[in-house]
Amino acid sequence: MTISVKRYDPHKALIQKLVSALFLENYGDFRSHSFINNHYLKVSLNKTNSLLFNCIEHKGQMVPFKVVGNEILLQSEAHPATAIELDSLMSHFISADWWPNSDSLRIISKWQEVLSTVNILAQPAPVQSHAELLEWFAIVVDRPNHPFAHAKASLQDILTHWHGQNIHWWAFPKARVFTRNDEDTVQTLLGQYDAAAINHKLAELQGDYIALPLLPSQTACALKIEDAHDLCLVTQLGYATSSLRTFFHQDDPSVHIKLASIATPLGAMRTMPPRYLYNGDCAFQLLQQIVSRSTFLSDRVVLCDEQAWWSLGENADMLQCKGEIGFQIRRFPKSGKKFMLSMAALNHPESWHIIEQEGICRTTLLKNVCRYFVKMGLEFLYFGVAPECHGQNVSIAINSEDDFVFVLRDHDSLRICPDQLAVHQLTLPDYQINWQTPNTLVLPNLTELSKYFITLGLQVNLYALSQAFSPYEKESQFWQQLSEDIQEALSELNNAAFSNWAESNFIKQPSWPFKEILAPLFSASDDVTGMPSSMATIANPLYELNTVKPEQSCEAH
């Protein structure tokens, strides 16, 4: 299918992501070296050289400029401005006097990975249905303001073999495998003929074995597992989701198959440590309790069942095992809605045109999605939890602009505040972590917990979504609506103490938390299992709205 380049050009979007990330994080004091001049963003590299990006200035916005063209110029005092290629852009930035000391070779290598993926995504989408196209959109846009999100390493191969996702079957001693499920993996994934072939091979092995599927790139990991056996059988899955390691079941689109990978997109190995999967089970049970206690959450939120999983690795200790071999069956609840898409897909402007073609009012849908998403996030905080609600982890099953539900998945990142759970007499989940040391799953208070909803929910999800399609003339109108949505949600919760805290934390604070990704990514090693990031601060756009003079506030509407 052909996608309109006018609505979303992946190469132009990559330039925007890079300069936006540099600006938002003020990496290397980027802001003091850049300014808008004659429809160009000019970035000084040193005393004699500058980079020029074709931009439109948008004063007062979180990112005060919008890239409007692919052309990048290198301006020098001694020579006329000359065009440079996108693949050399990172080399020029690294050469800047103000660029912090970093592993230049690693950064450039990651940048080339990014470009290799983006070049594929700039081609016509190899899809055969609207459902596939919407998932492809989520891959194309990936994470907003994360210029290295497309560094997919070996997962890029999945894009080039879109309708032929091979999985290799291996047998592993059951004693080595972490699981809490007795389900037959073979019967779940395979047809009768292939299932019979695998079961025959398992029967020939001496010992108690289980058959698990692997991505081709995991074969080297399997060879390191004692008493593992290649069953010499290759089968296929359906097309990939936006993570590129989770696939649709060929016969049932409500079932996804998630596989471990040693690839390092987002700067971390995508293995499946058994403690993560176990924690996901505990989080799922806690979320079920919370949803059942709230009329709103019961009506608007459904949960994926991810309790069928298997994991193992070289280390046999659960807390130390990286899960180099891993497999999970993710079952989406039957919603009865017309269609479903991830919120990440809504970051692609073309998705909104598909929604309109389905007879859905996109303006009303956007406002309702934002309104109910805010209410969902605040209700979860009220009970003491924060799901990781960026666009890839939240889907929307839709009938109409008023009739839709949020579908939550990837429960292993559910963050909790024990004190707030205790207020509601909710049992602390049995997370397999070191409870005595600081971590990002268990937070000491609501303010620390709320940072993950503000950053991942409001900034990475809703704000990015509004940039793809906004019925507002000014960005300030989006923030004003968000402020009103927060106040409305707090009014409906009707808890004075929580409302006072939330209003102070979300609206009345001059600064907001903000997740930095560039410096952590550039300094991380590739063997970590979580995306490198760190918490910083940016100006709170809701505070800005509520501190302007009355006459200025009127003009914004």
Image (cartoon, rainbow, N blue to C red):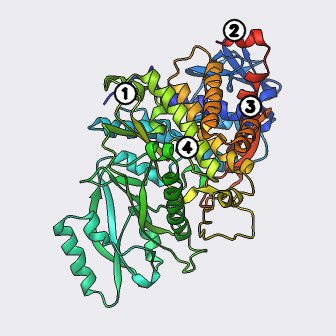
Numbered disc 1: secondary structure: helix
Numbered disc 2: secondary structure: helix
Q: Which mark is residue 540?
A: 3
Residue 223, percent from left and from top: 44, 76
Q: Nearer the viewer, residue 171 or 283?
A: 283
Q: Which mark is residue 555?
A: 2
Name the amino acid type tagged 2: Glu
Circle 4 Cα neighbour tier, 10 Å, few/some/many (<14 / 14–19 / ≥20): many
Rounded to the nearest angstrom, the CA distance separating label 3 from label 2 is 20 Å
Q: Which residue is mark 1?
A: 355
Circle 3 Cα neighbour tier, 10 Å, few/some/many (<14 / 14–19 / ≥20): some
Q: Which residue is mark 4?
A: 390
Left or right, residue 161 beside residue 85:
left
Q: Is residue 147 in view?
A: no
Name the amino acid type tagged 1: Ile
Residue 59, percent from left and from top: 71, 17
Left or right, residue 211 beside residue 302:
left
Instruction: State which tag comes first along the sequence, 3 or 1.
Output: 1
